Amino acid sequence: MRVRRGKGRVLVGADRERRGRRVRRGRPLRKGLLLGGCGALLAGCASMPDSGNLESVDASQRPDSQSQVRVYAMPPREGALPVEIVQGFLEALTSDDPKFAMARKYLTKEASKDWDPEGSTTVLADGPNTDAGNAGNDADGSRRFSLTGQQVATVDKQHAYRPAAASYSQFVHLSQVGGPGRKEWRIDKPPPGVVLGQSDFQRIYRSVNKYYFAGPSGTGANGPRGLVADPIYIRQRIEPLTETVKALLEGPTNWLDQVVDSRFRSGTRLKDPGKSLAPDDQNRLTVQLNSQADDASQTRCREMAAQLLFTLQDLTPSGVEQVTLQRSNGSMLCVLSQSHAESVAAHRSADRPDYQYFIDEKHRLVRMPANAGSAADPAPVNGILGTGDQPLRSAAVSRDEKRAAGVSRDGKALYTGSLVLEDTLGKAQVRSRATAEEDRLSTPSWDGRGDLWVADRDPKRPRLLWLGKGEGEPVQVEVPGLDGRIEAVRVSADGVRIALLVEGKDGKTSLWIGRVERGEGERPAISVLDPTQAAPRMEEVTAMSWAGGSRLVVVGRESGGVQQMRYVQCDGSVLSRAALPGLTGVKEIAASESEQQPLVAHSDDGIVRLPAGSQWQTVVKEGSAPVYPG
């Protein structure tokens, strides 16, 4: 945050400590925010000057994601000027204040009653700017200031993050309150919700995956119902475990609600919402629910407990090993341990594949052990796709690693074959009529149900196709809402979300995540709905792969930048420490949805992979189209 008085400039709030810049001092300054952590309490914020213009309020420098620094707001000083009140309120929004109690001290009583900081969070690129040119006196002697900025996202009441590039403009209105001789300036019309800069958002909030069961429209009437990740953002230092449980009980976010189910009955909440939840010293968590859960069956109760266990797995340093659910009277409903949760609810992104696959220099599908070192020699797969009789340019392997699909070297035809039995090459499952090779079939993708997806990029007849169990006549998938041609397809392990690289009219490709909805029958109507851009900061995305329950790894570049690889969330947010070690000329990328497996890429150096905690290692100099099962 920045305040100018004459030629002097001081940094206030958390900025002065985090930025480490030189502070030029003028008049003595009042403390307004305190930073605490790492065993020390640091004075952070200074007061506004007595006069002069109010200028920009910068977001703080992006913090280290492991930092233990906490920010504490300070109340307004007696006789504070309007500019101090506005500045203090904006600073208080970036503090670790559980109920925003200190921010409310800058508001009138009526405004504090109406203001809902939990209703929405607006994220601006560089924090809110106050335009002194639009600040002024109203006819009744009150004051107003405008807040402006470049909006990049919003977080709604459901804690759901949504990219939203737009200009931000709101007014803050102040009036005087109190009796004669003791009037104080306070804000009577604050901006809606919370508004803060992107770097403060990354310091204060963290991404958490809630888990729900895939519903009938997400899996098909007879499909398996595994768990689906529903990412949200919570304040990471304000009761994160308790707040996550509350969010899980409230149900899935609107975007996912149509294709998932919760085993918690509607209206199920914590018996005592004000009580903090925490595991005991053996990582066992007890959760008492209200009367809506009192008559839950053992099967339903264990499914509820599985949702909790998978949702809370990363929220404590050592995880939650066991969940006990209690009725409203304190009696036990059920107990479920982490070791038994997988048998209750399929969590496919936790599966660890046996092999990594790619196309070798002889245009065969080959494989190598997923956890082996770089010295492991790739070997052709069993079956017709490993013989080279039909040269391939790309392939996909089913998640059970029993079947594969391959696209012919010229891109015209899609074939399927067994990886466990010797078979002969059958007829093509799909054919493209496109004239140019680059306009033909994309790399295929298997979903968690064992169905196969592929895009035909024929400019005259672009199609997204689905083959039930990889067989039979393909079904054309409806994809309303996308303006462009689908270049690449990757379906998530749960089969409910699909990642698409879409080429726009400007010739550049962008990453979109759609929701898959299926009808019933052998040839169901299938649609991909409500596509959301997942890497909005990148001007062009050239390769991508799912890399977890709600995470993807992408290759692309920002405007005016060079090629880079980074992790993004499927909701369009960027994770802290998302950048990966540099690698030149990356053409394709593959990741396992089990986050313990190394990345594999096709680059100028050939087929390479990135073991955890290491650098890129070359596997072979010649090869292309690396994939994990999926």
Image (cartoon, helix red, strand yellow):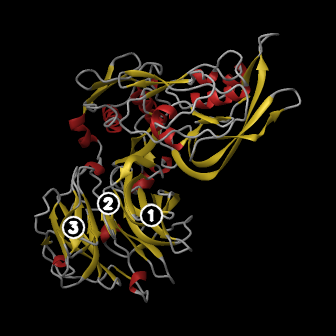
Q: Quadrant of the N terminus?
A: top right
Identify the residue under disc 3: 357
**Closest to the observer: 630 or 571?**
571
Q: Determine if residue 194 is in view.
A: no
Say which mark, if any, is on residue 582.
2
In the image, farthest residue toward the right: 139
Please, what is the three-letter code of the amino acid marked with disc 1?
Arg
Above or below, comparing residue 263 to residue 542 in the picture: above
Q: Position of residue 396 (x, y in %)?
A: 28, 69
Q: CA distance from mark 1 to mark 2?
A: 13 Å
User: Does the CB distance between marks 3 and 2 fall below 8 Å?
Assistant: no
Of callouts 1 and 2, the N-terminal one: 1
Disc on the earlier residue, 1 or 3: 3
Residue, x 26% and y 68% (percent of image)? 626
Q: Amino acid at mark 3?
A: Tyr
Q: Is residue 79 above or below residue 627?
A: above
Q: Residue at x 21, y 53 (%)?
A: 614
User: Local crowd at mark 2 within 10 Å, few (<14), some, or many (≥20)?
Assistant: few
What kind of element bears circle 3? strand
Q: Which mark is residue 391?
A: none
Location of the C terminus (image quadrant): bottom left
Separation of marks 1 and 3 at Cα, in angstroms = 26 Å
- Name the residue that disc number 1 marks: 557
